[in-house]
Amino acid sequence: TQLLEQSPQFLSIQEGENLTVYCNSSSVFSSLQWYRQEPGEGPVLLVTVVTGGEVKKLKRLTFQFGDARKDSSLHITAAQTGDTGLYLCAGAGQFYFGTGTSLTVIP
Amino acid sequence: DTAVSQTPKYLVTQMGNDKSIKCEQNLGHDTMYWYKQDSKKFLKIMFSYNNKELIINETVPNRFSPKSPDKAHLNLHINSLELGDSAVYFCASSPMEGRGLAGTYNEQFFGPGTRLTVL
C-alpha cells in the first residue's frame, strides 16, 4: 500500500479566506487525483494531474503536481460555504486514497 | 438516472449475522470497486472487478465475498459480522481498469454509500 498523507487533517476557516491542502507521499505516482466528498455522499472527482510540475485551475481551485510527482497541493481562493467537505487525493491507479482533509467554511 | 446505486443506504445488524450490500451501475463501465470508509474517513480499497473478474483483493478477511453476476453489478456479502466491520461501504465504477501503470488513469464514480452498524 502506498501511503498518501494529507495535511491538515481538519481545517475551519471563514468565508472569503484562502487555504491550501497538501498531499504527500514517499512514492512516485504516474498521476494523482483530487476528489471532494460531501456528507452522506460518495467522493466526486475534481481533477487529475499527470505531468510533474503541472498546474490546473478549476474556477477558484488551483491544483499543483510536484516536480518529482510525489506530492500535490490544492489551493482554494476566497472560500465559500459550498466548498465545505472532505478533500481526498488518490494515486497509483487511483485505488489508494489519502488520509483526507475535512474543510469547514464558516459563513 | 442514478449512475451508481447501492442498497440499502443504512444497515443495522447484530454481531454474527450475515448481510449483503448490492451495487449497480448504469454507466456501461467495465470496472467496479468496493471501498470501506472508517470512522476517521479513511477510504480503503477492498476489491476491484473488471468484466466480472476479480483483479484486486486487498487483504480483506475471507468473511467478505464479492459477487459480480454481470459487469453492471457487484454485490458484497459479509459473513459472521464483527463490531469492527461497522463503517460506510462505497461501491464505485470506472470506464477502464487502472493499475497505476504509467499513463493510465481514469475517473471513478462512487455510489452514495451504505452505512453498516454492527451491534
Image (cartoon, helix red, strand yellow):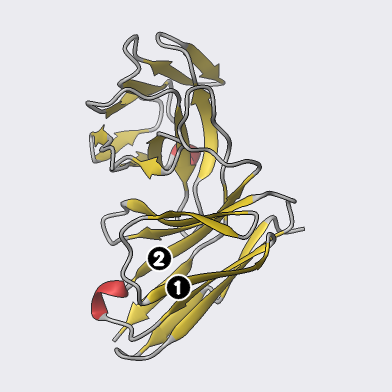
Across and down, in percent, residue B38 comes to 30, 61
Tell me which amino acid carries mark 1. Answer: Ser
The N terminus of chain A lies in quadrant? top left
Is there any visible trace of residue A37 in the rendered image? yes
The C terminus of chain A lies in quadrant? top left
Callout 1: chain:
B
Q: Is residue A34 above or below residue B22?
A: above
Across and down, in percent, residue A80 comes to 46, 33
Give left or right: position of A96 versus A37: left
Q: Residues within 10 Å of mark 2 (few under 14, many from 20)?
A: many
Which structural element holds mark 2? strand
Q: Nearer the viewer, mark 1 or mark 2?
A: 1
Across and down, in percent, residue A81 comes to 46, 39
Check if mark 1 and mark 2 are on a common chain.
Answer: yes
- Tell which circle, 1 or 2, labels the residue nearer the N-terminal end: 1
Query: What count of labels does the image hold?
Result: 2
- The residue indicated by pointer 2 is B88
Q: Is residue B53 above or below residue B101?
A: below
Numbered mark located on residue B65 in the image: 1
Mark pair 1, 2: CA separation: 17 Å
Task: State yes or no: discs 1 and 2 in contact (Cβ < 8 Å).
Answer: no
Tell me which amino acid carries mark 2. Answer: Val
Give left or right: position of A107 versus A20: right
Q: Residues within 10 Å of mark 1 (few under 14, many from 20)?
A: some
Q: Is residue A35 above or below residue A62?
A: below
